[in-house]
Amino acid sequence: MVGTPIVLLYRMKNMLLLKTRAILGAFIGVVFAALAWSGALDSLEDLTVDYRLRLRKPQAVSDEVRLVGIGDRDVGSQLGRWPFPRAVHGDVLSILNATGAKHTTFDVLFTEPSADADQDTRLKATIEKLPNVTLAYHFEQAVPDRHAPQAEDQPHFITDGSRFGLHVNDLKFVRGRLPVPPFVKLPVSYGAVNAVPDADGVIRRVPLFFAHDGRLYPSLAMQTIIAALGLRDDQISIVPGKEVTLVDTPRGTLRIPIDAHGQYRVNFLGDLGVFTPAFEYLDLYQAVQSPEMGAQLGAAVKDRIVLVGLVSTGNTDVVSSSIGRVPGVAVQATVVSNILTGSHLHFLPRWQQALLIILAGALLGLGMWPSRAWLGIVIFLVMTTVWCGVAVLAASANFILPVVPAWLTFGTATLALLGLEAAAMKQDRSRVVGVLGRYIARPVLERLVDTEHSAPAATERRELTIFFSDIRGFTAWTERAEPDEVAARLNEYFAAMTPFIERHGGTLDKFIGDCIMVFFGAPARVEDHAIRAVRMALDMQREMTRLNENWSKRGYEPLHIGIGIHTAYVTVGSFGSSTFLDYTVIGRGVNLAARIESQAEGGKILISARTHSLVREEVKTRPHPDLMLKGIPEPQVVWEVVERD
């Protein structure tokens, strides 16, 4: 029945520790959730998102989007060196229109007049006949800074952005400065091609609208969507930090998530290989001459949006993206495809991310069972692996889970909880050593509880130094003194002497009445076990003198101890049964040490010849008459240790 409350107390303690660990894990989760909320971890998180996007299999782009690239076959062909004569672009536009392209967007800048004015005239004439075209322009500067300086001159060819009903000057949208228009005004739509890379030079987000001079201006991809779907002003609504909504479109309502700067996180579906079928300029010229190629081109581009841009190797319009280096036109085409299909990257709201991280930290804490640190490590590895696996699988479905704050929470919580466990174990060890150290020799106990050392061997033969001390006339004194006085003085005597045993590295074997038995050299091996024993004996005699002075002041008669020391090979180890063991020494050397001590007068220290040979250079001794000891036929040579002058 006694065991039941003990078990209950133990379980209550474990539950309390478990609760503490869960709270600690949750608190660490709160810390990293707050860091994630503040955006301090966004740069690291972006790297993990990039890696997850690379791990995905290439995904199909919208069937409504086609890509015509100016490729390696085009550059240096009969079309001429790059930049091509502008009439070539006019020819391409005419071919696409003839084959039924719904809308054509040029991701090519025509910001300067060409050397041949006739080329510009021919391109202008072609474009004027085909209004379903979007041309590119760029800002000299585009930064997500609400305090960026504004240009004084507003280009007349950019559609007024105030139609969205927003106070543009109060927004944090990407600011465009010093717009660079095409070389001539044309009756088509225009979109800005600027993108703002992150600090590491990687483009992960593109602005859908730029703020300039109190108005908003669409990007090239956004303007392509607006023009291709024929959207009016009232079909577009913008909620900064949330989404751009396109209503009543031929594709229904389209919702495009944006951040506070009006930027869209690009869901990169793969490299150029995902835009299939794709064509180069030479393919279009061939389609004019080959009915078969013409039919193939018509089937591919009819009623579709076509984006035209440089894709040749070594061209300057190549950017670093989440999935590697890609042509700029591929970024624009990917954004158009994402918008049309609704294939966006979905991130949990900040508060949901924070809650998920906190719960993960608490769950990890629950896994750190008391005295089972290994289980906590296993759970850390399992949770981290599972979390990463789920994050990769979720990314394949365009769902992005937070990874970096989860990793940091798991790692920090594991270290903190293991540290807490280590501290608790150390405290328990100290408590055990403190309690049991009063009953078991401390060197033996420390060996038993110290996992860094093996437990003392069962038995072994080793040279040790054996120490015995005894109070002279103890039996006669106990018959004269009161029992309370005997108990008090004996405890006071032992309390004064035992610290010297630990100080000099001895192992207390036992108290035998008023006798103290100590051995040196086990369980920890030491080479100077003999001198340690002798120095301890000298300290004990000095302490005995001090005790007698105090006892004399209290009216007690003095007591004196005799000490005997011998060094010999003995058997040391654990002796006993399967249920109880005693770590001690046995052998002839032990008996000899006890016999020597029995012949030592009060206040004297006698050592054997073997001990003397080991310490004579360290302490002062003088010869003592040989001793005839009980049970030992031959006389024993002994020496007396004396204090130095």
Image (cartoon, rainbow, N blue to C red):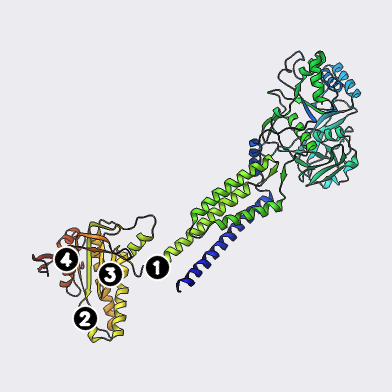
Helix, strand, or loop for circle 2? Answer: helix
Q: Distance between the residues labelled 2 and 3?
A: 19 Å
Identify the amino acid type marked 3.
Lys
Which residue in the protein does label 3 denote? 510
Mark 1, Cα crowd under 10 Å, few <14 / some 14-19 / many 20+, is few
- First in sequence, mark 2 or 4: give its number: 2
- First in sequence, mark 4 or 3: give its number: 3
Q: Position of residue 486 (x, y in %)?
A: 28, 82
Pointer 3 with pointer 1, Cβ within 8 A: no
Quadrant in which the C terminus is drawn? bottom left
Q: Where is residue 381 in the image (x, y as percent from the top left)?
A: 54, 48
Pointer 2 with pointer 3, Cβ within 8 A: no
Helix, strand, or loop for circle 3? Answer: strand
Mark 3, Cα crowd under 10 Å, few <14 / some 14-19 / many 20+, is some
Seen in the picture, residue 449 relative to 192 is either above or below; the reply is below
Tell me which corner region of the image, top left, top right, bottom left or bottom right, holds residue 289.
Answer: top right
Q: How far apart are marks 3 and 1 (CA)?
A: 18 Å
Seen in the picture, residue 168 relative to 593 is either above or below; the reply is above
- First in sequence, mark 4 or 1: give its number: 1
Identify the amino acid type marked 1.
Gly
Tell me which corner region of the image, top left, top right, bottom left or bottom right, holds residue 463.
Answer: bottom left
Q: How far apart are marks 4 and 3 (CA)?
A: 17 Å
Left or right relative to 211: residue 399: left
Left or right relative to 299: residue 358: left
Which mark identifies residue 475? 2
Q: Nearer the viewer, residue 264 or 162?
A: 264
Identity of the residue drawn at 42% across and 63% down:
429
Mark 4, Cα crowd under 10 Å, few <14 / some 14-19 / many 20+, is many
Asked if residue 213 can be seen in this view, the reply is no
Tell me which corner region of the image, top left, top right, bottom left or bottom right, holds residue 561.
Answer: bottom left
Which residue in the protein does label 1 denote? 434
